[in-house]
Image (cartoon, helix red, strand yellow):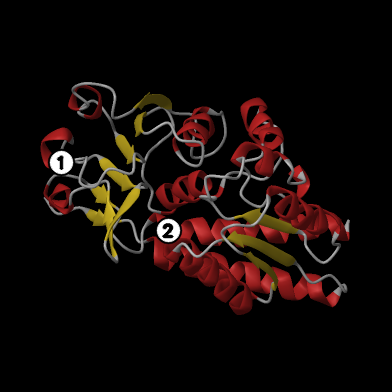
C-alpha cells in the first residue's frame, strides 16, 4: 500500500486565494486587514516563520505590522509593545512568536494579548470559547488539520482519532476541537503522550493518528493500522533539516499521510490569514 498524500501546500494555496478575494472586497469598504507579529530575539526558525507569515500577507493583500525586539528586552518593554498593538486600530489580529527567552514570563505575556486580537486562538479566553463550542478564533494548527482531513475526504465523524501530544498549541486544542459536534469533527478522541508506555496499544486501534509530540520518527509502520490516516504535526530540527514525528516508511502502511514538508505547516499559516481576515470583518461590522 502507498499512502495518499495529504497535500497541505495545495490546499493552503486555495485558502490563500479565497482570503485574497475576500480581503479585496473588504478593502473596497475601506477596511484593510492588518496582521501583526512580535518577535523577541534571533531564533532562526522563529525568524523564518515570521518572515513567511509576512510573505503570505503580501500575497493576499493583508497589511503587515512587525516589531522585532532584542533577546534581552525587558518584560516591561515587551508588555508596552503588546499594549500598543492592542490599541492600534490598524492591527486587527497579532501574535507574539514563541518561544520567548527564558527571562520572560510567557504566561504573563500571552495573557496581555487582547483576546479579540489573538490570531493564534490560544488566549485562555479563546480556549474557553473552544471548550464551550462558542464562536471565536480557532487555534491555527488544529483548525488546519481538520480542514486538511476534510478536504481529502478522510472520515473523522464517529471514528477513533488518537492524538499523540498534549501541548497547548496542537494536542490539547485539537482534541477539544475534534470532539465537538461540528462538521468534520464529532470523533472519539484519545490523547496520549511520550510518557505513556506502548503507544502502539492505542495507535493500532486508530482510524486517524495525529502525531504532535515534537519527537522525530516517533510513529513507525508497526504502530499504524493498514489504511489509517496519519498526520505529522510535530516537528524537530537536525541542524537546518526539519524532521517529522512520523517516520517516512509509514507511507507503506497508511492510507493517508502528510509529507515531511508541505503538510500541516502551510495550513497553519493559511488559518492564520483567515483568522486575521475574520478579525477585520468584525471591525468592519
Query: Residue at the location (20% across, 28% down)?
Result: 204
Q: Residue at x 32, y 48 (%)?
A: 232
- Where is the C terminus found, in terms of image quarters? bottom right
Residue 266 appears left or right of 19: left
The answer to which quarter of the image holds residue 5 is: bottom left
Query: SS at mark 2?
Result: helix
Q: CA distance from mark 1 to mark 2?
A: 21 Å
Instruction: Identify residue for label 1.
Output: 220
User: Eyeballing the image, is 28 above or below 219?
Assistant: below
* In this picture, residue 167 sits left or right of residue 112: left
Which residue occupies 69% across, 48% down? 75
- Helix, strand or loop at mark 1: loop
The vertical placement of 156 against 70, above or below, is: above
Kindly identify which residue carries mark 2: 265
Quarter of image, res 25: bottom right
- Examine the rendered structure and indicate whether residue 50 appears above or below residue 203: below
Can you tell which quarter of the image residue 33 is in?
bottom right
Q: How many residues crowd mark 2 within 10 Å: few (<14), some (14–19), many (20+)? A: many
Q: Earlier in the sequence, mark 1 or mark 2?
A: 1
Amino acid at each position: 500500500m502507498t499512502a495518499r498524500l495529504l497535500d497541505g501546500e495545495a490546499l493552503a494555496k486555495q485558502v490563500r486565494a479565497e482570503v485574497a478575494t475576500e480581503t479585496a472586497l473588504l478593502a473596497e469598504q475601506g477596511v484593510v486587514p492588518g496582521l501583526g507579529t512580535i518577535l523577541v530575539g534571533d531564533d532562526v526558525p522563529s525568524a523564518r516563520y515570521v518572515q513567511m507569515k509576512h510573505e503570505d500577507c503580501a500575497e493576499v493583500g493583508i497589511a503587515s505590522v512587525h516589531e522585532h525586539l532584542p533577546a534581552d528586552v525587558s518584560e516591561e518593554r515587551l508588555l508596552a509593545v503588546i499594549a500598543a498593538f492592542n490599541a492600534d486600530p490598524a492591527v486587527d489580529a497579532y501574535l507574539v512568536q514563541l518561544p520567548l527567552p527564558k527571562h520572560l514570563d510567557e504566561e504573563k505575556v500571552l495573557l496581555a494579548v487582547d483576546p479579540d486580537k489573538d490570531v493564534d486562538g490560544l488566549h485562555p479566553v479563546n480556549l474557553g470559547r473552544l471548550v464551550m463550542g462558542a464562536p471565536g478564533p480557532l487555534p491555527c494548527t488544529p483548525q488546519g488539520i481538520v480542514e486538511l482531513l476534510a478536504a481529502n475526504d478522510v472520515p473523522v465523524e464517529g471514528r477513533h482519532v488518537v492524538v499523540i501530544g498534549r501541548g497547548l498549541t496542537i494536542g490539547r486544542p485539537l482534541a477539544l476541537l475534534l470532539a465537538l459536534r461540528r462538521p468534520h469533527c464529532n470523533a472519539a478522541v484519545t490523547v496520549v503522550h511520550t510518557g505513556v508506555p506502548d503507544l502502539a496499544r492505542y495507535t493500532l486501534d486508530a482510524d486517524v493518528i495525529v502525531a504532535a509530540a515534537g519527537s522525530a520518527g516517533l510513529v513507525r509502520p508497526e504502530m499504524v493500522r493498514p489504511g489509517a490516516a496519519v498526520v505529522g504535526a510535530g516537528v524537530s530540527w537536525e541542524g537546518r533539516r526539519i524532521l517529522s514525528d512520523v517516520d517516512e516508511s509509514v507511507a507503506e502502511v497508511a492510507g493517508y499521510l502528510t509529507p515531511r514538508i508541505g503538510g500541516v505547516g502551510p495550513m497553519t499559516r493559511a488559518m492564520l490569514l483567515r483568522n486575521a481576515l475574520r478579525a477585520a470583518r468584525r471591525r468592519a461590522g
